[in-house]
Image (tube, grey):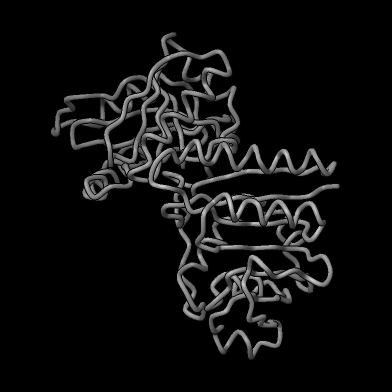
Amino acid sequence: MNHLYLHCRPGFEKECAAEITDLANEQGFFGYSKTEPGSALVSYVCHEPDAARRLIRSLDFASLVFARQWLAGPAPLEGLDPADRLTPLLTAARELGDVSQWWTETTDTNEGKSLSALSRKLGKLFGRELALTPASRWRLHLLFLSGTSVVVGVSPTANSARWAMGIPRLRQPSQAPSRATLKLEEAWHHFIPAEQWDERLRGGMRGVDLGAAPGGWTWQMVRRGMFVDAVDNGPMDQALMDSGQVTHHVEDGFVYQPKKPVDWLVCDIADKPARVASMIGRWAAQGYFREAVFNLKLPMKQRYLEVKKRREFLEAVFAEYGLEASLAFKQLYHDREEVTGHIRITR
C-alpha cells in the first residue's frame, strides 16, 4: 500500500502535488507525484511498501489546501474483466482490512461523470457482499478511473473529508440572490463542526460582509439570525434589505472600518491576494472580529506559493500582536480560481 491518492479541482493538480510532496517530506516520507493536467487526481507514490497508510495517519487532512479527499492503497487494479469486475474488487477490499463504511467514487471530470452509472451499479452488488465492522475507524473507497481500472483504498473516517470525493451536496437556495451563497455555506460546513453551529453561528450575532452585493454571503448570515453590515458600492438585494437585519454601507470594502468589533467578518472581494490578506490582517490586529471567512483569488502561476506567502504573513501578524488564533485554508468545491481562508481568534 504505497500509493496516496488525492482528489482535487481540475486544473490544480500541480498545486496539489507540490503540497503533498512538501508535507510528506516534512514528515519523513519520500516518494514522487504522478498526475495529468485536468485529471482532478494526484497519486503520491511512496518509496516504502506500506508508507501511504502510515502517511495518511501522520498528516492532518485539514491542513491540506488543495486536496478535496484522499485515500491510501496499492496501484490501481487494471484490466478488469467486464464480465466479472466484482470478484477482484472484493478480493482487493478484503485485503485492506476491516472498514466501517464504503463509498464509490469517480474523478471530478467529464470522463469521471460518465462512469457514475457503472460505479453505482457495481456498488450495489459490492455492498451486498462486503461485511462491515462498525467499530473500524477506516472507510473503503472504490475509485473508478475507467470501466476496467479501479483504485481500491482506505481513508481514516476521522481524518478525511466527510463527503465522497470531498464534494458536499448543497442545494442552491431559491431565495438567495446569487450562487456565491454556497461558498460561505460550504466554508462553514468545512471549518466549523456541526455540533458547534448553534454556538458559533447563533442568532443575534453581528457580522460584516465586505464586497457584499448583491448579498449571497449576507443572505447566509441573515438566515442564521445575524445582523449584518453589508459593505459595497453596488446595490443589495431588496428582499435582504426588507428583512430589517441588514445595513447597507455604500463604501469601498478596503476603506470601511466597523464602529465596534463584530462576531463575524466575511469577505469575497476579487482583488490581489496580498491586498486582501493585508486587510484581513489589519482587522485581526485591531480586534475587529472573532471569526472570519475570506477568499483569496489566486494568480495564474505559483498558486501554491502564493497561499504559503499569505499564510506566513497572517501568522506573522498574529505573532506581532500576541493573538492566539487558528488559521486554515481550503480550496472548496464551490471555489474556482481561489482558496477560502478561515480565522478564529481565541485570545
- Whether residue 126 sits left or right of residue 17 in the image: it is left
Residue under the point 68% across and 57% down: 292
The image quarter containing residue 286 is bottom right
Given residues 117 and 293, the one toward you in this image is 293
Choose between 262 and 84: the one closer to the eye. Answer: 262
The foreground one among 203 and 23 is: 23
At which x and y percent is residue 291? 73, 56
Residue 184 falls in image quadrant:
bottom right
Q: How many marks?
A: 0
Compared with residue 216, is residue 279 higher up or lower down, i.e. above or below? above
Viewed as shown, does residue 205 lie left or right of 68?
right
Q: Residue at x 75, y 67 (%)?
A: 202
Residue 156, image quadrant = top right
Residue, x 42% and y 54% (percent of image)? 336
Residue 248 coordinates in the image, percent (x, y): 66, 82
Viewer-nearest residue: 2 or 312:
312
- Residue at (18%, 37%) from the top-left corner? 147
Q: Position of residue 332 (x, y in %)?
A: 49, 51
Residue lying furthest top: 48
* Quadrant where the N terminus is found in the figure: top left
- The picture places residue 107, in percent across and down from the top left corner, at 32, 42
Vertical arrangement, residue 317 with respect to residue 70, above or below: below
> From the viewer's perspective, is 265 left or right of 151?
right
